[in-house]
Image (cartoon, rainbow, N blue to C red):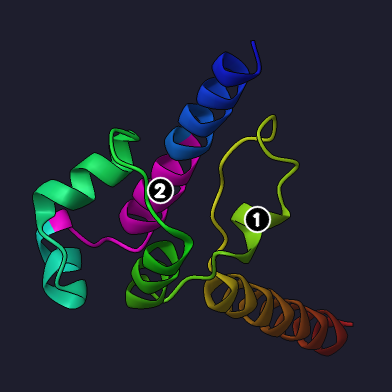
């Protein structure tokens, strides 16, 4: 029974890791071919990682994430395996926060000038 549970847990991890990588790649607008060029991994192997067919090592996962400019930290912070796979591009989030802050300042100035 432990062997079956372990196999299921490994399969779930592989699936979730692959989904994380696929979402990160798509979020950053990078094709499998381009990611392969950046990492030296064949597009076919990337497809196998993303589908969960092949196990991706933590080292390889970090290499791919680095090539995409994202962090793997959000993946490992999840309450795995029950949490959904997700990706955060911290640089993009920070840019959005900065833009929102700037917009709020502009609105404040406009309101003050109109009163």
Q: Is residue 16 above or below residue 115?
A: above
Report the predominant secondary structure element of the magenta stretch.
helix
Q: Is residue 13 above or below residue 5?
A: below
Q: Position of residue 14 (x, y in %)?
A: 44, 38
Q: Is residue 77 above or below residue 93?
A: above
Name the residue tied to disc 2. 23
Outermost residue toward the top? 1
Which quarter shows the N terminus? top right
Which quarter shows the C terminus? bottom right
Indicate which disc residue 40 carries: none
Q: In the displayed structure, does residue 15 sit left or right of residue 80?
A: left
Q: In the displayed structure, does residue 48 sit left or right of residue 73?
A: left
Could you tell me which residue is drawn at 75 percent across and 78 percent down? Answer: 107
Q: Position of residue 75 (x, y in %)?
A: 60, 53
Could you tell me which residue is drawn at 39 percent across and 52 percent down? Answer: 21
Q: Secondary structure at mark 2?
A: helix
Chain-order first, disc 1 or disc 2: 2
Q: Does residue 20 show up magenta in the picture?
A: yes
Q: Secondary structure at mark 1?
A: helix
Which one is nearer the viewer's eye here, 85 or 15?
15
Say whether marks 1 and 2 touch (CB < 8 Å): no
Name the residue tied to disc 1. 76
Could you tell me which residue is drawn at 42 percent across and 40 percent down? Answer: 19
Q: Position of residue 41 (x, y in %)?
A: 16, 64
Classify mark 1: residues with Cα within 10 Å, few (<14), some (14-19) or many (20+): few
Please name which of the two marks, 1 or 2, marks the residue nearer to the observer: 1
Q: In the displayed structure, does residue 44 sit left or right of residue 65?
A: left
Q: Which residues are magenta?
A: 16-32
Q: Quadrant of residue 102?
A: bottom right
């Amino acid at each position: 029974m432990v062997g079956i549970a372990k196999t299921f847990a490994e399969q779930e991890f592989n699936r979730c890791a692959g989904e994380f990588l696929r979402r990160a790649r798509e979020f950053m607008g990078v094709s499998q071919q381009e990611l392969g060029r950046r990492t030296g991994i064949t597009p076919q192997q990337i497809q196998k990682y993303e589908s969960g067919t092949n196990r991706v090592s933590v080292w390889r996962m970090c290499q791919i994430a680095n090539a995409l400019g994202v962090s793997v930290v959000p993946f490992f912070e999840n309450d795995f395996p029950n949490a959904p796979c997700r990706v955060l591009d911290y640089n993009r989030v920070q840019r959005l926060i900065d833009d929102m802050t700037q917009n709020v300042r502009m609105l404040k100035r406009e309101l003050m000038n109109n009163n």
